[in-house]
Image (spheres, rainbow, N blue to C red):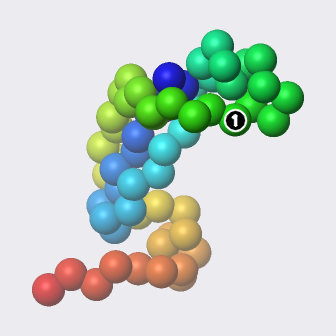
Amino acid sequence: MCDYELFHYTCGHVVDQLLSYCHFARSDPFHQCYGVKAIKQRWSQQFDCQDCQCGGGRIHRR
């Protein structure tokens, strides 16, 4: 299981970031992991993601 952290943005998007590879992914030449993602940390951001800040795909809420 590779370790990830999640970033929750006010625009509604969620982005994951790799913290560390598992044993199998470290041994694989392409760093492929066939296990589950282990979420180690969740972060709530007080701003929109970078795509939405640049005028990208803003999610419209009702």
Tell me which corner region of the image, top left, top right, bottom left or bottom right, holds residue 40: top left
Residue closest to the eye, 9 or 23: 23
Foreground of the two, 6 or 27:
27
Pinpoint residue 56: horizontal percent, then vertical percent. 54, 80
Q: Is residue 27 left or right of residue 4?
A: right
* Percent x, y of residue 2: 54, 25
Q: What residue type is disc 1 on?
A: Gln
Q: Position of residue 23 (x, y in %)?
A: 64, 13
Q: Position of residue 1 (x, y in %)?
A: 50, 23
**Which class describes the residues within 10 Å of circle 1: few (<14), some (14-19), or many (20+)?**
some
Report the number of numbered marks.
1
What is the residue that sits farthest to the front in this orientation? 34
Q: Quadrant of residue 17?
A: top right
Where disc 1 sits, the SS reads loop
Disc 1 designates what residue?
Answer: 32
Q: Is residue 36 visible?
A: yes
Residue displayed at 34% across by 50% down? 8
3 lies above or below 59: above
